[in-house]
């Protein structure tokens, strides 16, 4: 039995402080942060060898956008759920993210309670889906 039973989380954001803050909020008994990336390209490279249950994804990055990366993730890691964590508040971006499979959308600046509440809802969905698959 693995020592850590938490769901695996991967963080993609071009701001190092945001990645560090999310890691500090998320890492614990329920979640294990298994990696992060600051660009779309580095995220693609790292996600080829790292499996995540939940991916926290920013929309605006220096070498691409989170919406394109969301579509790539849906193909390459279809079991992973995506939580958008971004400063982008325009309605089109929010709607497109959710339509393309994101399970949640958190606007920066965020508070730790909102992050954890949203992760817990997504985590409960993952665990229910896995339990149904074993039944």
Image (cartoon, grey):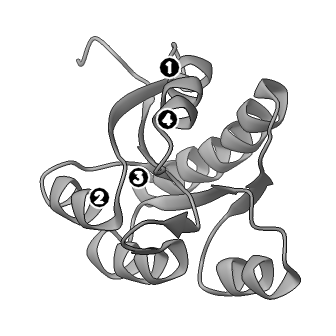
At horizontal 68% and vertical 57% (from top left) the residue drawn is 86
Most distant residue in the front direction:
62
Is there a contact, CB below 8 Å, between mark 1 and mark 4?
Answer: no
* Label 3 residue SS: helix
For this view, does 21 lie left or right of residue 74? right
Residue drawn at x 41%, y 52% as measured from the top left: 134
| Along the line of sight, the residue nearer the viewer: 29 or 71 | 71
Label 1 residue SS: loop
Q: Earlier in the sequence, mark 1 or mark 2?
A: 1
Q: CA distance from mark 3 to mark 1?
A: 27 Å
Between the C-alphas of marks 3 and 2, the distance is 31 Å
Residue 121 appears left or right of 7: right
Q: Position of residue 88 (x, y in %)?
A: 75, 67
User: For mark 2, what is the residue?
Assistant: 43
Task: Mark 1 or mark 4: name the one nearer the start of the chain.
Answer: 4
Q: Secondary structure at mark 4?
A: helix
> Where does label 3 land, which residue?
134
Question: Considering only order in the chain, which callout, 3 or 4, is on the residue closer to the N terminus?
Answer: 4
**Mark 1 touches mark 2? (CB < 8 Å):** no
Q: What whole-number distance in Å separates the C-alpha atoms at marks 4 and 3?
A: 34 Å
> In the picture, which quadrant includes the N terminus?
top left
Marked residue nearer the N-terminal end (3 or 2)? 2
Tell which tag, 4 or 3, sits nearer the viewer: 4
As measured in the structure, the alpha-carbon distance from the residue carrying label 1 to the one carrying label 2 is 19 Å
Give the residue number, with chain letter if any, for mark 1. Answer: 27
Report the disc number at residue 19.
Answer: 4
Give the distance between the C-alpha atoms of the residues marked 2 and 4, in whole angstroms: 13 Å
Q: Quadrant of residue 127?
A: top right
């Amino acid at each position: 039995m693995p020592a850590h039973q938490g769901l695996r989380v991967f963080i993609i954001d071009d701001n190092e402080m945001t990645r560090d803050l999310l890691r500090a909020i998320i890492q614990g008994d329920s979640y294990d942060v298994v990696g992060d990336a600051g660009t779309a390209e580095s995220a693609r490279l790292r996600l080829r060898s790292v499996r995540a249950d939940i991916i926290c994804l920013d929309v605006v990055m220096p070498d691409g956008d989170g919406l394109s990366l969301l579509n790539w993730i849906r193909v390459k890691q279809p079991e992973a759920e995506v939580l958008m964590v971004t400063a982008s508040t325009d309605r089109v971006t929010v709607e497109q993210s959710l339509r393309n499979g994101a399970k949640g959308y958190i606007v920066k600046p965020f508070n730790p309670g909102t992050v954890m509440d949203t992760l817990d809802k997504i985590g409960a969905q993952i665990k229910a889906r896995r339990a149904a698959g074993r039944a």
